[in-house]
Amino acid sequence: MATKVLPQPERDEIRVEAVLQALGEPVRLTIVRALADNPAGVCCGEIELPVTASTRAHHLKTLREAGVLSTHTDGTRRISILRREDLEALYPGLLTGILSAKQ
Amino acid sequence: MATKVLPQPERDEIRVEAVLQALGEPVRLTIVRALADNPAGVCCGEIELPVTASTRAHHLKTLREAGVLSTHTDGTRRISILRREDLEALYPGLLTGILSAKQ
DNA sequence: TCAGTAGTTCGACGATCATCGTACTACGAT
DNA sequence: ATCGTAGTACGATGATCGTCGAACTACTGA
């Protein structure tokens, strides 16, 4: 098995500007919505996106470094999970507010 | 008197990506925090910001066009007010979540 | 009327960003 | 071992963005 968690900021290192900037991009917002629908985590490649694999990797890195999601390895795949608890603790209501936007 | 409201999107025209992108900029977030502390509205020039007047005007326009704030004239001054009701209706909890971030 | 104040608009400039193709790494299966 | 798959890293490029100064508009007060 030997799963490994990719580097990410601690809860107290998360900055609200970075989170908002990360969420304010259409492709990344699509990713976040997909993660919200799958609490168990989603394999990056399974999310349908209008961009190439390298751009997808770039967006996932941006979201991870902002503290929005967590990624761990699983063989050749990478499973991403929304950091709901951390975000809710830091900015209560923010995530649910965004997700309640009707597309 | 003859106050006039500057052009802004209707509630149903507000897009969440635009709102998040507008809020994800340090100077603009400072403006929003100042407005949140003054429900009656704030004159643009009264907010202390590390930018020139033209940059300030640019940020206020961005926030207004995103639907975050409303501006009306009052003589030579322009009073800006946070669109709390609209934002709360569209994205319940988002604003309070952001404002609860400890700077 | 004239000067001063508050703010916007315009063009320019440098920085950041989203996107891509290519090359690379890591793992699993044959 | 070798091949295929999943994903990352690296430049490069074109677009967007934050910033500024200068010129302009609109209103107030002397």
Image: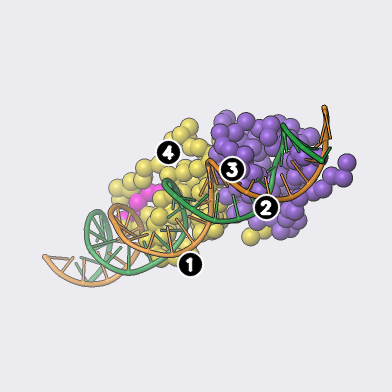
Chain colours: A yellow, B purple, C green, D orange
Chain label for disc 3: B
Mark 3, secondary structure of its residue: helix
Q: Please name the residue shown 67% across and 52% down the image.
A: B65
Front tag of 3 and 4: 3
Q: Quadrant of residue B30?
A: top right
> What range of the chain is rendered magenta?
A70-75
Mark 2, secondary structure of its residue: helix
Chain label for disc 4: A
**In the rendered picture of this protein, how many numbered marks are placed on residues?**
4
Front tag of 3 and 1: 3
Disc 4 crowd, CA 10 A, few/some/many (<14, 14-19, 20+): some
Q: Position of residue D19 (x, y in %)?
A: 53, 41
**Do the numbered discs 3 and 1 sit on residues whose CB atoms are within 8 Å?**
no
Where the N terminus of chain B falls, by quadrant? top right
Which numbered marker is on residue B55?
A: 3
Q: Please name the residue shown 65% across and 56% down the image.
A: B15
**Does label 1 lie on the same chain as label 3?**
no
Where the C terminus of chain B falls, by quadrant? top right
**Does label 4 lie on the same chain as label 2?**
no
Asked whether, in this view, residue B7 is left or right of residue A39, the answer is: right
Q: Which residue is mark 1?
A: A50
Which residue is more in the foreground, D21 or A59?
A: D21
Which residue is more in the foreground, A40 or B82?
A: B82
Which numbered marker is on residue A90?
A: none
Q: Please name the residue shown 39% across and 63% down the image.
A: A53
Q: Is residue A71 magenta?
A: yes
Q: What residue type is disc 3 on? A: Thr
**Does label 4 lie on the same chain as label 3?**
no
Q: What residue type is disc 2 on? A: Glu
Front tag of 2 and 1: 2
Asked whether, in this view, residue A39 is left or right of residue B96, the answer is: left
